[in-house]
Amino acid sequence: MIALLLRDLRLAIRAGGGFGLGLAFFLIVVVLVPFAVGPEAGLLSSIAPGILWLGALLACLLSLDRIFALDWEDGSLDLLAVSPLPMEAVVSVKALAHWLTTGVPLVLATPLIAVLLNLPGEGFRSLILSLALGTPALSVIGTFGAALTVGIKRGGLLLSLLVLPLYVPTLIFGAEVARRGLSGQDTSTPLLLLAGITCGAIALLPFASAAVLRVNLR
Amino acid sequence: MLKVSDLQIARGGVPVLQGVSFEVSSGQALVVRGPNGIGKTTLLRTIAGLQPALDGAVDVDPDDLAYVGHADGIKSTLSVTENLTFWAQVFGQSDISPALQTYQLEGLADRPAGLLSAGQKRRLGLARLLVTGRNLWILDEPTVSLDTNAVEMFSACIRSHLAGGGKALLATHIDLGLEDAKELDLSPFKAKPMSVNAFDEAFL
Amino acid sequence: MTSLWTYANPKKFVETTDKVLPFVSVLAIVCLVTGLVWGFFFTPDDYRQGSTVKIIYIHVPSALMAINAWLMMLVASLIWIVRRHHVSALAARAAAPVGLVMTLIALATGAIWGQPMWGTYWAWDPRLTSFLILTLFYFGYIALWSAIENDDTAADLTSILCLVGSVFALLSRYAVNFWNQGLHQGASLSLDKEENVADVFYHPLLVSIAGFVLLFLALVLLRTRTEIRARRVRVLSTRQRME
């Protein structure tokens, strides 16, 4: 399992792996927002948590189809299926690798990018906390979507259509935490619910993803 | 011991083969033959556990087989060593040098797999079998894009695997020079279409 | 005593529905016409909402069926996963577009009703938002069915999507509740509550709900038959190409 994780990370970092692409996309989305809504600092700072969450979600979505597509094309997925690794482990490791290469950089970059949107100082803590807790769920749910569409040619659009509705609860609770943190309210309830979704998704979804992947490999 | 009894298999929902039965015991190789489209790949994938059979039984230990398909599962940005080491680790092995030696890949060990020729990639794909430590090898058209020299390496590798008590199931069109390999022609097992009026649960 | 599962045989299913479908269709039309005419022309105006209240006879039944259609798909998907009856998978496939249309009707009538009552066509109210999310789930489900060529693969994948989607739809429902308190009135109907809508509105509403249920049943049966035949045609043409 560790070998698979290391291989995926190595592939992501080497040329053509698309590492950093999501990060650049995140930056661009956030930069475009002031052009669309105007440069007024008060407005920007009040919508900043939502924009940053939406940007992170879209950046995550962008890299989902790479999770399985490359391994599918070169036959590695077939070989992994007959290897000693259970499919559930393969799926979980893939989700973890996706989170490490997409989610973690996003969380780390958020404080810098939040400055662009005039996010007040008191909003930082809860925003970063909510992203750190929420992005694993995004990766795991996205892995399920990627497993569903792996056999479909040009399935990228379908992948978005399938995954985005599944992202709704995570987005709602995550952005709620960030918003409440910004306005100085108590964040513990949405934070716990967000953590609950993340834990539930990590615990249960790999089974669904593995089942779906086995169907697709037939 | 691999035992297949009365197997019926389908490709894309359409039955292609039925009543396939055979056995492969230690030290034996079985070469599956038949025209294109008869269902050789489907048969091998079914035995490897990648797809379910329509009917019949495959008696095989899924933890003791290794499969080589049409694609080699090689990552072009990783070097030959990295590719092999990864699969060795997945299968809980550590030593890749015999595999490199058998397929004469030592000179290429540090080269990114993306820069290999088609035949060299295939050799790397076959070398992968040696790092699995598995007893039953299932090989689908293993000699595609290999030159005569490499085919010789491959059949030597198979022979030493069999001599060590291994088993092999191959689908191939060429003669590998395996003396006591059994052959199985799939043509007689082609699935007969059911009558058009049998409009039952399976739709076919 | 024949088991319920005998109807899972496509041939038996088609034969049976041949006989049942006309009755269901006629009954659906009778109930719909009765319920709607009764509701529209023979009930008094509400003292507060005026005649706008009469849209309830379409809004409530369609909203009810929008959710029930998804539940039916969920049950059919489970049956497919556990027992692998093809008719079950095809019935789930057949129900999806009907459920989608019901959802859209509920949203549209809700918007039309919302304008005079709340002064706006749309509000990000939990119930409205949940229905919008349900629409997205229907779209995804239908798109996945149509994107995959192999019928059995498609049935397997959509069934699992339906299962996972149901969990997330339920989660979204609670998330949305948490996110925004709404304008929408409480449930119009419930079995254990005293304050249902008044009897004058209640009886025609029940009739039109029965009409919508029967309409749904008729459409699903019809569409399932179509799916069975379409699949039969695909199978036969595949075989012809192979011979």
Image (cartoon, grey):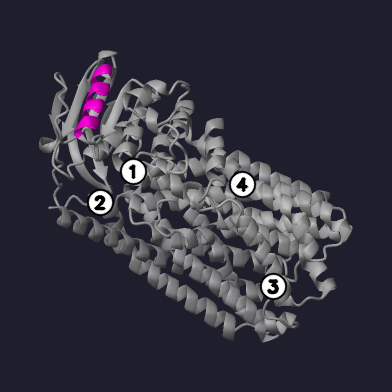
Q: Give the letter of the chain under mark 4.
A: A
- How busy is the neighbourhood of tag 2: few (under 14 within 10 Å), some, or many (20 plus)? many
Q: Disc number at residue A101?
A: 4
Say left or right for B143 vs B79: left
Say left or right for B6 vs B134: left
Q: Nearer the viewer's eye, disc 3 or disc 4?
A: 4
Is residue A20 part of the magenta span, yes or no? no
- How busy is the neighbourhood of tag 1: few (under 14 within 10 Å), some, or many (20 plus)? few
- How busy is the neighbourhood of tag 3: few (under 14 within 10 Å), some, or many (20 plus)? few
Q: Amino acid at mark 4?
A: Thr
Whether residue C28 is situated above or below residue C14 in the rendered picture: below
Q: Is residue C216 among what the camera can see?
A: yes
Residue at (52% x, 43% y) in the render: A11
Whether residue A87 is situated above or below residue A99 in the rendered picture: above
Q: Give the letter of the chain under mark 3.
A: C
Q: Disc number at residue B100?
A: none
User: Residue C29 at x, y = what percent?
Assistant: 43, 75
Gap between marks 3 and 2 measured at Cα: 51 Å
Residue at (77% x, 51% y) in the render: A128
| Start-end of magenta stretch | B148-160
| 3 or 1: tag closer to the N-terminus | 1
Q: Amino acid at mark 2?
A: Phe
Task: Please tell me if label 3 and label 2 are on a single chain.
Answer: no
Q: Give the letter of the chain under mark 1.
A: C
Tell me which corner region of the image, top left, top right, bottom left or bottom right, holds residue A155. bottom left
Magenta span dominant secondary structure: helix
Q: Disc number at residue C198?
A: 3
Secondary element type, mark 2: loop
Q: Disc number at residue B203?
A: 2
